[in-house]
Image (spheres, coloured by chain):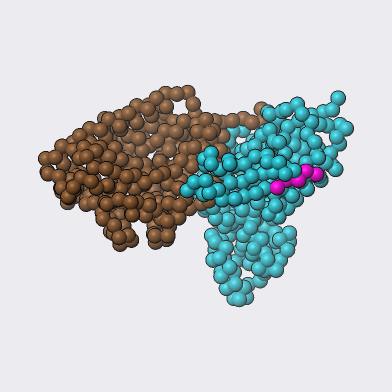
Amino acid sequence: MNNKITIGIPRALLYYKYNVLWQSFFKELGIDTLISPETNYEILENGKKNTMSEACLSMKIYVGHVDYLKDKVDYILVPRIVSLEKGMKLCTNFSALYDILNNTFDINILNYNIDVDKGITEELAFIKMGQELGFGKILSLNAYKAAKKEEYKQNKINYLLQEKRLNRNKTKVLLVCHTYNSNDNLVGKLVTDNLKEFGVDVIYADIINPDGDRLLYKNISKALYWTYNQELLNSIEEYKDKVDGIIFLSTFPCGPDSLVNEMCSHKIDKKMITILIDELSTIEGLQTRLESFIDILRKDRFYE
Amino acid sequence: MKNNAYLGVDIGSISTKGVIIDDSNNIIACEYIKTQGNPISAVKQLIKSLESKFDSNLYKIVSIGTTGSARKLAGKMLGATTIKNEITAHAIATISIHPDVRTIIEIGGQDSKIILVDKKIVTDYAMNTLCAAGTGAFLTNQAKRLDIDINDFGSIALMSKNPVKLAARCSVFAESDLVHKAQLGYKKEDIVSGLCKSIVNNYLNNVAKGKKILSPVVFQGGVSKNIGVVKAFEDELKTNVIVDDIGHLMGAYGIAIMSKKSVKDNDFSFRISDANFETKVYDCSGCANNCEVIRIYKDMKLMDSWGNKCENGLK
């Protein structure tokens, strides 16, 4: 296999969590990548057309991005991740992603398979991916290690920027939301753009200190087995006393979020609202909910 | 020297409300009309009617506030100085009339809310999701189905001694439930009373779930005019529920009070009702987002546009 191939990366779901890792890895190996553009209505529409109606909005968006890339690249990176830690799980969508895409489109999917419960670690997955692209074990491993360093650096920078926002004297809201939703143009950005317009600083629960205490989540629940939701719980514990309120944002219909957010509303004593985003076309209802929530946080006394 | 007056307009899905107040928050003119799916003509009609009730020799309007789902559009038309969401507006109005209020229940045409207040500060709120189950629209639908005038709904409900149990989560399920009960031979008043109860149960289980309802409780919005629902709330909450005469005007009243903070020294002219307003909505093709862009024209001149996500939408 030669190096002249291009790998397509859909700008959706786990892209937002691992983009630095993925892109650095391919860069180390000298492979070109093509990343789909920010989510727009065309991508969403194409995603809806190619997905069963029960899938969640984030999934539909992902399928739309794959649809965008399918004729433009040689391979598409579609991760299959079952578990990232022993005894822990991801939402079943992430284990099913490979099969769903394979059955929807006629595309070449790059082998990327992590299942720590069965002994397949991230490192092994990357070595295998490198080998499939024609690189040796050592070369692939070195590329992975270099990419891992880049990932750490970026995570640290994101965390330090967040700390800066935490120390500013503005109304602060903690956005508890999966990375793939908080960064998406048609999901999280609708919310964060509006909040910024109201002069509110957004603290992201999905920005995690790579050197921070990772066991804080136990104060809320010890039994939760979804890795990404556990990370969000950890952030709630870390940030909740430094913010004015919490916004839980999820896409419809998200199984893990519907359970975890409900649990949080019983266990955490803080002003909070839950916002559920579906394939809506107007944002007036969203603005009303956000604006009144901010009014409450600021304890505005308009009548005096 | 004319006295200052402040105008508040609340444009909801079903009705449009206008209130003019003076410096001590007394209402000097008010009006309530149906929106009928056309907020522009509703606002014009509202302003015309307010003008006839308003003494322009005594007062001049120095600030304007708009609220409700069409607050942005109406705000542009009227040159509003304050544009705010209806939750805050309702809270401000209620607090100014009932300073000790703890819970505000609001059920309107398409949405329902609960607002919790402590020491004159709003502490929490919740609102129904996109579905309009358990709101005025649901009741109007069922009244039509039973061939009852919605204005008689409450008094019919009060006649019932044996209200039926109905599902109120969804208008579609309620229909099959309702037809079924009617065919079993239930009296009309029992079904109507059952509907009132189901509205209350739906509200308490979905909108107010997990929130502590403390008294004094104030009930507002179009549905508060239905004494059947008021009675059902009192039975369920086991407390007195306050319904104000001006409960349907609260949003407009609240935004009028809030607009006092943004007084501008220009005399508002009622001539707005003669101007020609037009909106054009189109799907922008400037980029792949296909935004729905709304443009508002006054006498053929472009006043404002919104809805675009990027610069391309302005062309």
Q: Quadrant of residue A21?
A: top left
Q: Is residue B276 magenta?
A: yes
**Which residue corresponds to the image point at 41% horizontal and 30% vertical from the top-left?**
A241
Can residue B3 be seen here? The reply is yes
Horizontal and vertical percent position of residue A47: 41, 55
Can residue B247 be seen here? The reply is no
- Left or right relative to B240: residue A272: left
Q: Is residue B28 magenta?
A: no
The residue closer to the viewer here, A208 or A70, is A70
The colour chain B appears in is cyan
**The magenta stretch spans which residues?**
B274-278
**Which residue corresponds to the image point at 11% horizontal and 40% vertical from the top-left?**
A138
The residue closer to the viewer here, A73 or B58, is A73
Work out which residue is located at the far right of the displayed protein and give it: B57
The residue closer to the viewer here, A218 or A104, is A104
Horizontal and vertical percent position of residue B199: 59, 57
Report the quarter where the C terminus of chain B lies: top right
Please give the letter of the chain rendered in brown: A
Number of callouts in the render?
0
Horizontal and vertical percent position of residue B139: 64, 60
**Which residue corresponds to the image point at 18% horizontal and 47% vertical from the top-left?**
A2
**Which residue corresponds to the image point at 59% horizontal and 33% vertical from the top-left?**
B121
The residue closer to the viewer here, A253 or B199, is A253
Report the quarter where the N terminus of chain B lies: top right
- Left or right relative to A135: residue A155: right
Horizontal and vertical percent position of residue B165: 57, 65
Q: Quadrant of residue B25?
A: top right
- Left or right relative to A154: residue B110: right
